[in-house]
Image (tube, rainbow, N blue to C red):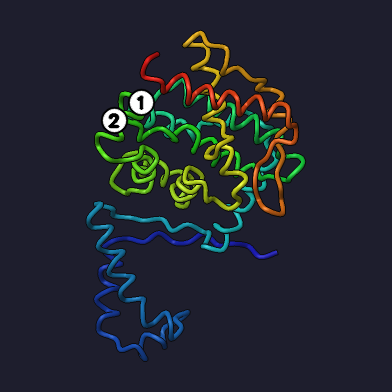
């Protein structure tokens, strides 16, 4: 069994002296130093200067190197992924990792109750599909983040403001998520470097796999499922009511074409009637 030795600390004064010495040597002379290969000899001086500059800027006198390298980091990340896959299906919206995402959405002034309900519905749909289609636990977290933030770019006065200002709220949402200058973009990157693009892809509807994105962005998504029932309740019109539990149980994935569909035609027909209610009643200026 190989015993990993503890690495010695790096002292700023000694590092500065070493950098001066290395600068006086040629590449061939640096190659002759213990444990220095030709490839490392060409970059070690630049690396030493960068490290010295960082330590000076941050006023660090002593730095303790980690005993682990990039290889171990990759292995640890993979083990964490395996651990995440074994977790029970608890609500991701309550996960501590997504609390910052939730907090940013709140500061953006989005409709909190709607976002939480969409995330809850998205997770229920995911949990119903996961055992059959072997969906990963990581995909569930991506889905929850996208559901929480899907309306971050939504303007006031519903969709009316979009025609006035000439933008679609989903485009504005995606721009905010992908930007390195927005708070929501920074929070997502702190969680994971690839999270902003994955969340944006789900909202756009072109995430791979597409069926997963359709849970949040399609004609049969959790967003529409929520607002049809909510608006029906708020207007007192029963035309928008449909059997939510039945439709969730009837959702399946067409793996050949990578799409979400409803296997029970009766509940699909009722859902389409509810969608017609939204267009004919809620958008009627006379009502």
- Image quarter of residue 282: top left
Is 261 on the left or on the right of 210, as rendered?
A: right
| Separation of marks 2 and 1 at Cα, in angstroms | 7 Å
Closer to the camera in the image, 158 or 81: 158
Is 19 on the left or on the right of 9, as rendered?
A: left
Residue that appears at 67% across and 32% down: 89
Is 13 on the left or on the right of 259, as rendered?
A: left
Residue 220, position in %: x, y? 59, 35
Tell me, for residue 50, which label it has, or none: none
Is 56 on the left or on the right of 151, as rendered?
A: left
Q: Can the viewer see residue 94 in this picture?
A: no
Residue that appears at 36% across and 61% down: 10
Residue 61, position in %: x, y? 28, 55
> In the displayed image of the protein, which residue is found farthest to the front?
286
- Image quarter of residue 123: top right
Q: Are marks 2 and 1 in contact (CB under 8 Å)?
A: yes
As drawn, 133 above or below 269: below
Closer to the camera in the image, 220 or 30: 220
Residue on which the image places disc 1 = 158
Residue 138, position in %: x, y? 60, 44
Residue that appears at 65% across and 36% down: 126
Q: Can the viewer see residue 23 in this picture?
A: yes
Residue on which the image places disc 2 = 161
Where disc 1 sits, the SS reads loop
Closer to the camera in the image, 146 or 171: 171
As drawn, 70 above or below 98: below
Number of numbered discs overlaid on the protein picture? 2
Quarter containing the C terminus? top left
Residue that appears at 65% across and 29% down: 124
Residue 29, position in %: x, y? 35, 89
| Label 1 crowd (10 A; few <14 / some 14-19 / many >=20) | few
| Label 2 crowd (10 A; few <14 / some 14-19 / many >=20) | some
């Amino acid at each position: 069994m190989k015993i990993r030795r503890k690495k010695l600390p790096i002292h700023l004064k000694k590092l500065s002296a070493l950098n001066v010495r290395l600068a006086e040597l040629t590449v061939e002379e640096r190659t002759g130093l213990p444990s220095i290969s030709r490839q490392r000899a060409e970059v070690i001086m630049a690396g030493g200067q960068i490290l010295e500059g960082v330590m000076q800027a941050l006023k660090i006198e002593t730095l303790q190197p980690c005993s682990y390298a990039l290889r171990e980091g990759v292995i640890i990340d993979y083990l964490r992924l395996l651990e995440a896959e074994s977790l029970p299906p608890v609500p991701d919206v309550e996960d501590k990792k997504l609390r910052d995402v939730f907090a940013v959405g709140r500061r953006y002034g989005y409709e909190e109750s709607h976002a939480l309900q969409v995330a809850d519905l998205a997770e229920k749909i995911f949990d119903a599909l996961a055992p059959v289609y072997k969906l990963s636990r990581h995909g569930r977290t991506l889905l929850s983040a996208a559901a929480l933030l899907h309306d971050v770019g939504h303007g006031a006065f519903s969709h009316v403001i979009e025609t006035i200002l000439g933008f679609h709220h989903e485009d504005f949402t995606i721009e905010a998520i992908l930007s390195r200058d927005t708070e929501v973009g920074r929070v997502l990157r702190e969680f994971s470097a690839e999270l902003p693009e994955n969340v944006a892809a789900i909202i756009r509807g072109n995430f791979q796999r597409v069926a997963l994105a359709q849970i949040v962005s399609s004609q049969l998504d959790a967003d529409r499922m929520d607002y049809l029932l909510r608006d029906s309740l708020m207007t007192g019109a029963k035309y928008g009511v449909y059997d939510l539990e039945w439709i969730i149980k009837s959702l399946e994935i067409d793996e050949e074409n990578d799409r979400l569909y409803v296997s029970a035609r009766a509940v699909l027909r009722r859902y389409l009637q509810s969608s017609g209610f939204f267009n004919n009643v809620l958008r009627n200026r006379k009502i």
